[in-house]
Image (spheres, helix red, strand yellow):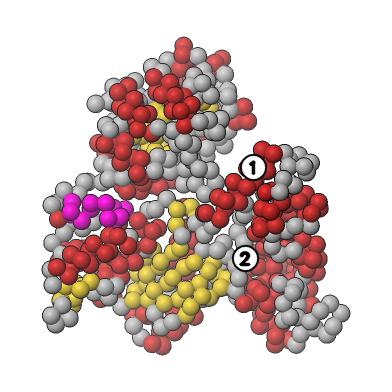
Amino acid sequence: MPRPGGSETRRCTSNPRNEAFPPSGSPGPNLFNLYFCMDNKAIAGILYETADLLEIDGQDSFRIRSYRNAAQAVEALPQQISELISEPKKILEIPGIGKGMLLNMQEMFKEGKLSLHADLLKKYRPSMLDLLKVQGLGPKTIALIWSAYQVCDLEGVEKLAREGKIRILPRMGEKHEAKLLKAIEDYRRIAGRFLLDAAECEAQKIVDHLKNFPGVEKVTPAGSLRRGRETVGDLDILVTGKACCDDAERDKLVEHIIKLPGLMEIIARGENKVSFRLRGGMQVDVRLLPPESFGAAMQYFTGSKGHNVALRQRALKMGYTLSEYSLARLDDQKVAAGRTEQEIYAKLKLDYVPPELRENQGEIDAAEKHSLPALISVEDLQGDVHMHTVETDGRNTIEEMAEAAKAHGYKYMAITDHSKNLAFANGLDDKRAVEHIKLIRKTAEKIEGIKIFAGIEVDILADGALDLSNSVLEQMDIVIASVHSHFNQTPLEMTDRLLKAVENPNTSVIGHPTGRILLRRDAYSFDLDAVLRAAAQKKVAMELNAYPDRLDLCDRHLRRAKELGVKIVINTDSHHTTHMDKIRYGVVQARRAWLTKDDVLNTLPAQKFAGAMKHGWN
């Protein structure tokens, strides 16, 4: 859930203990100070916080959503609300803002605050907003803790849990308390990290904001996002063009940058760099570069640190110095390369190293020996074979999923709804599964241009047995066996459980094999090597679940799977037609693992893929 950042503007308007505004009952601020504080970002910040506080207060979801929608509308508005406040009709024309929200804005400009927001802050304290970021600490639990102990900050809640005071509350207990302590520990460990798709989305907003500015030629994300790391800490955005070279034009560009919707705090503002924090807490560094340095800067700011150190050492041995500005000769500082990354690597007698491989894991030696692999690409995939429909917990029909797969250019796809153990997902029992197979095959006869395989995502039960009868599973074209419960088994129990699933003759693929959910749940513990060795022997593939919350297997485990001769299937685990777009995140992880199309089974044509799902891969 997005949270307002900590800019001076936000502090001016939304912190009731700040003295920018006089206490209630005293004369209000003069018009100049009021309008200075009440810019769009400040108004949006108050509305976002009000929504969060209303959620803690247990208010109606429609009312909560109305505040969030209005905040987003104000934040994205190119014109300042302060310029429109005297023209209510124009404000009401803004999508997401109704008469009630107009009254709220008029109150903010008249009183310097929103009374509802101020009252909720007095009741619940600002630190409660941070508690909502902790997994397992929902609004109702936070309100319960506050009611019992008047504790509203992370340290206070942790202290209560360690003293055994959470377990005695209604609907709590010792297990809930232990989970809460673990969640707080996880929150501290992952604070400041963001999922790959979230980081990509923020980067795209910045690119869109800057790309049409006069004199801007290129706007490109770098850093860990460009390398495809599974989570991202901050964003590096490189900008080049004429607007970056002229002082006056550069000043205009900087002014344009800081008008970015969602920018909440300016951290640093220099001649060639602007650093700021976005509403959700992500830090962004935008660097303004002359065209002749763009390639050198892209190489430097893409990283990783280990790759860059190794490359600089190589440059020094060859008589060059490599920086973010250029590759230059040591003797006379004459620039040898810098405009593109390709010319830098070529000058150092290396093949171009794709960004995903730049982790100092042997890629420089391989580039020198011309032995870098031809990495897999999205275009290599011929099908996506992990999809759910309205029969269980998906949002679309078989026909809709198939048409979406066709639109992606796939030659085949598979419907793999859940089995009965996943009761909350309306999973299939044996009888329904057989009927579903018939429905899939009947639908496949009506849709031309794509092969539709009938499959299942069957639960691996606690003892390693599969959740449906073998007589039903053997009718499936593909059986993805996955763990969805009992994550707290011992490593030995989990290993035995997975080995038993691999040994089942109907198992085609082990789905999201480590069970992790990024930034929320760690992988369960088991002997991965033992499972991979068994999978190689039984010709059971491992899934690379491309959904950004999972990315399971990770790049390290994928490399190990390849070493042990295990084939991979890249899937989206789609529950909606739009989820198929997320396949690219899985491909990025496969590239980071040095995988080629030969390592991935769903690069095969339909007939060969069907054989591979029955243990027929080489």
Helix, strand or loop at mark 1 = helix
Q: Residue furthest right?
A: 25
Residue 116 place in picture, x, y as percent: 79, 65
Q: Which residue is mark 2?
A: 4
Identify the image quadrant of the N terminus: bottom right
Left or right of 354: which side holds 346?
left
Task: Name the amino acid type tagged 1.
Answer: Ala
Q: Which residues are magenta?
A: 356-367
**Residue at the image position 30 percent from the left and 41 percent from the top:** 559
Q: Residue furthest front?
A: 163
Identify the image quadrant of the C terminus: top left
Residue 477 place in picture, x, y as percent: 40, 21
**Label annotation for residue 178:** 1
Is residue 333 in view from this perspective?
Answer: yes
**Residue at the image position 47 percent from the left and 73 percent from the top:** 275
**Residue at the image position 14 percent from the left and 55 percent from the top:** 368
- Determine if the magenta segment contains residue 45: no
Q: Picture quarter containing residue 272?
A: bottom left
Label 2, label 1: how far apart the Cα atoms are:
29 Å
**Residue at the image position 58 percent from the left and 23 percent from the top:** 420
Left or right of 173: which side holds 424?
left
Considering only vertical position in the picture, is 508 above or below 265? above
- Determine if the magenta segment contains residue 365: yes
Residue closest to the eye, 446 or 152: 152
Left or right of 35: which side holds 295?
left
